[in-house]
Amino acid sequence: MNTLIAASVLSADFSRLAEEIARLKNADLIHLDLMDGHFVPNLSFGYPLVSCIRDLTDQPLDAHLMVTNPETYVDNLANLGVGWISFHQETVYHSHRLIQQIKAHGIKAGIALNPATPINTLDSILADLDYVLVMSVNPGYSAQAFIPSAIAKIRELDQIRTSQNLSFLIEVDGGVNGDNSLILRAAKADILVSASYIFGSKDYTKSITTLKGL
Ligand code: DX5
Ligand code: ZN
């Protein structure tokens, strides 16, 4: 499978949102970072902006919930036409229930792991997941430096996937750029999320192509 690129609009110029989204035509997913100021020390945007973005593109929307009560967001996001939802393992008591709630809408379900959260917290639920989101920064902001321990985590997840014959995808998020994309693809990350590398470049199409290794 070719590597998928999820363009995170967190670094987009929201005053020119339609133009910005139109420049992401070769992105496979549009990544939406929803923050509540509790789980992470930042606020981003909410349903009105998700709705605007839904109207601007047919590309699949990938919601990354950095919130303390993700279960309360799922039904609204489903109504807004989001196709992928991940929540943080650190935020829930009942991850299996929430995965079922997401999947009941026909939405792909993922769990995100902070840099300090080990893979073995997912042992009993990996078979239920459509994807695992490996955070390679502490969540909350774009344009932070990549934390290299994410690479070993991706490799380990790929080994588990192969040895247990599972099919979850591996998504990596934070500090992804043209320099580290090769090693991330080699480690078997399936989806690379990027905000500042894409939106900080002149030619978004070219940056996305570089991330794909094409
Ligand atoms: C961080 C967000 C990321 C962020 C990535 O909390 O989850 O999706 O937008 O930004 P970059 O690619 O600039 O590190
Ligand atoms: Zn994200």
Image (cartoon, rainbow, N blue to C red):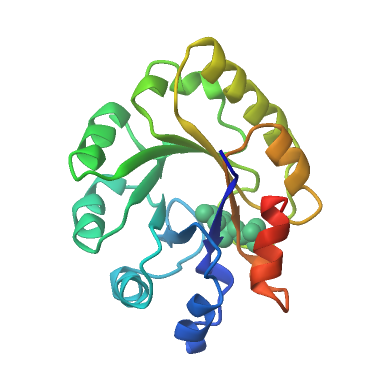
Task: Name which quarter of the figure residue 156 lies in.
Answer: top right
Residue at 44% x, 36% y is 131
Q: How many marks?
A: 0
Residue 129 shown left or right of residue 210 in the figure? left
Which residue lies at the image location 29% right of the left edge and 69% below the top edge? 47
Where is residue 207 drawn, in percent x and y? Answer: 70, 65
Above or below, comparing residue 5 to residue 13 in the picture: above
Q: Pick out the residue farthest to the bottom.
A: 15
x, y percentage for residue 117?
56, 30
Residue 176 seen in this snapshot: no
Answer left or right for 158 relative to 70.
right
- What is the x, y in percent for residue 210? 73, 58
Left or right: residue 166 compared with residue 197: left
> What is the quadrant of residue 208 in the picture?
bottom right
Which residue occupies the extreme top position in the image?
163
**Residue sitting at x 77%, y 56%:** 178
Residue 77 at least partly seen:
yes
Q: Is residue 205 above or below residue 127?
A: below
| On-image quarter of the N terminus | top right
Q: Residue at x 71, y 27 (%)?
A: 152
User: Is 82 positioned to the left or the right of 25 in the image?
Assistant: left
